[in-house]
Amino acid sequence: MTGFAAWVEGIRRVWRAPALLFGVWLATIAIGVPLAAVLRGMIVQQLRQSNVAESVATGASGDWMQEFADQASGIGVTFKPTIIGFGAVLDNLGAFLDNLPRPLVIVGAASAYILIWIFLAGGLIDRVARNRPTGAHGFFSAAGVFFFRFLRLAIVQWIVYASLFGWLHPYLFNTVFPAMTRETTVERNAFVLRLALYLVFGVLLGLFNLLFDYAKVRAVVEDRRSMLGALNAAGRFLFRHGAATRVYLLNVVVFAALVALYAVVAPGAGHSGLTMWLAVAIGQIYIGARLWLKLVFWASETALFQSRLAHRDYVAARQPAWPDSPAAEAIR
C-alpha cells in the first residue's frame, strides 16, 4: 500500500466509524463547557456593575474585553479580542512557537484533556485497526488495557518535549538567533533566519510526534506491553518504510489547508443574534474537522502499518465480548 492509498484508507475507516468523531467531540465539549460557564458568570457579574452592558450586548468591544481581562483572574485573563475567530488560532500558534506560558487554569484544563486522549487513544486505534464495529464494551476494554501502557509512554513523551521546549527552544531563539543577527542590519534577513529556526524546531517536533504515533499503533496492533520496545519497533519501521513519513506529511498538508480555510471563513466580532450563532457554528465545525483529522492521522498510520503485515486488518489482541464468561464462550 502506498502512502496515498493508506491515507485514503484511513479516511474510509474513520468515515465508517462516525461514533468515534462524536465521542471525541463530546470529550472536547466536556472540558470546555465548565470553563465557559465560569467565564460567563464572571462576565455577567462584571457587566452588572458596568455602564457599557447595553453596548457590549449588541456587539463585541475590544476595549471593554481588554479592560475586563486586566481586572480578572483565573480563566478571566484569557477573555481578550484574540479569542475571536481565527485570532484564537494565531494566538495559540504564537504561544506554541515562542514557548509562552499560559494561565494555570488553562494548563490544568489542557492537562485533563491530554489525560482523556491518553485514555481514548487505545480504544480509537483499536477500532480503526479492526475496521469493524467493536461496541462500547470492546472500545472501553481496549481503552482501559492501553491506558496505563500509554501513561508510561507519556512519561517518555514528557521528557522529550520538555527537553525540546525547555532546552532546545531557548538555545535556538535566545542564543543562536541573537548571535547570528548581532551584526545584521537588514530586518528581512533576521526574519528569514527566525523562520528557518522555526522550521528546524518544527521538523524535530514532527519527527518525535511521528515516532510516538507509530509506537502507539504498534502497541495496539501487536498488543505490546513494553512501551520502550514499541518505540524501538516504531523507529525501525519508520527507517525502513519511507511511506510512513509521506502519510504523515500528507496529513500535515491537509491540516494546513484546513487552517487556511478557517482563516478565510472565520467570522470576526459580530453582533448578537444570527451572526453570533453563525460564528459559533463555524467554530464548532472547525473543531470537528480538526478532531476528524486527528482520527485520520491514526487511521492512515494504522492502515499503512497493517498493509506491511500478512493480514490487512490484523490485531494481535482478541476482541473482548460481553458477557465474557464460559457460558458465552459455549454459545459462541
Image (spheres, rainbow, N blue to C red):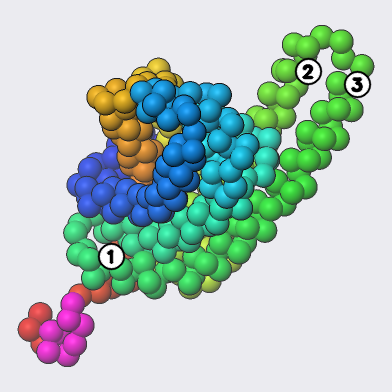
Residue 155 picture location, percent across and down: 60, 64
Contact check, label 1 and label 3, Cβ < 8 Å: no
Query: Vertically, is 189 above or below 159?
Result: above
- The residue wearing badge 2 is 190
Between marks 1 and 3, how big is the CA–CA gap? Answer: 56 Å
- Give the residue displayed 41% in from the left and 64% down from the top: 119
- The residue wearing badge 3 is 182
Residue 145 picture location, percent across and down: 39, 73
- The residue wearing badge 1 is 139
- Tell me which segment is drawn in magenta: 322-329
Instruction: Pick whichever, 183 or 43, lies toward us.
Output: 43
Between marks 1 and 2, how big is the CA–CA gap? Answer: 50 Å
Instruction: Pick whichever, 116 or 272, lies toward us.
Output: 272
Residue kind at label 1, given as amino acid type: Phe
Badge 1: few (under 14), some or many (20 or more) residues near its Cα, within 10 Å?
many
Residue 271: name its quadrant: top left
